[in-house]
Image (cartoon, grey):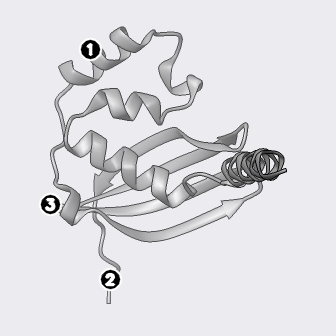
Amino acid sequence: MIIATLVVLVVLLGFAVVMGVARDPGPTAIDVALGYAIAVGNRDFDAAYRLSDEEVMRGRNRADWVDDQRSEAGLEFTAEHVRVRASREVGTGAEVELTLGSGLQGVVELVQRQRVWVVRSWTVAPVVEPRA
């Protein structure tokens, strides 16, 4: 009788763990945008690749894309300077504006694929202060 009770409890515990993992929504669009910006700032293009949508690859495989990114003149900024300025989320799309430090700002456009946010595009420009 005790063994049967233990088996039932273990099965119920296993079911609860599986349901908890299945219901986890994963990182938000802001989390993915911050992770992408920090990866690019640290020149960790392997991490940036994993956060990118297939459209960003333009038909290139991982090794080619990472090599192309490393060969381009790079932006370098540190994680402690990356801040969220604004974010908008509409349906399966999102846009996150970031301050990157060093007088730079970035805009990350994201799309949700199979309930996971991925980067669709990334643009960086100098910070433009509003005129008084």
Mark closest to the chain's N terminus, 2 or 3: 3
Residue tagged 2: 131
- Report x, y in % for residue 40: 28, 40
Is residue 57 shown above or below 87? above
Secondary structure at numbered mark 2: loop
Query: Residue 116's image quarter?
Result: top right
> What residue type is disc 2 on?
Arg
Query: Residue 132's image quarter?
Result: bottom left
> What residue type is disc 3 on?
Ser
Work out how far the residue at label 3 is from the one at label 1, CA to CA, in angstroms.
25 Å
Look at 29% across and 49% down and name the residue there: 38
CB contact under 8 Å: marks 3 and 1: no
How packed mark 2 is, by other alpha carbons closer than 10 Å (few <14, some 14-19, many 20 or more), is few
- Report x, y in % for residue 7: 77, 44
Residue tagged 1: 67
- Report x, y in % for residue 99: 31, 65
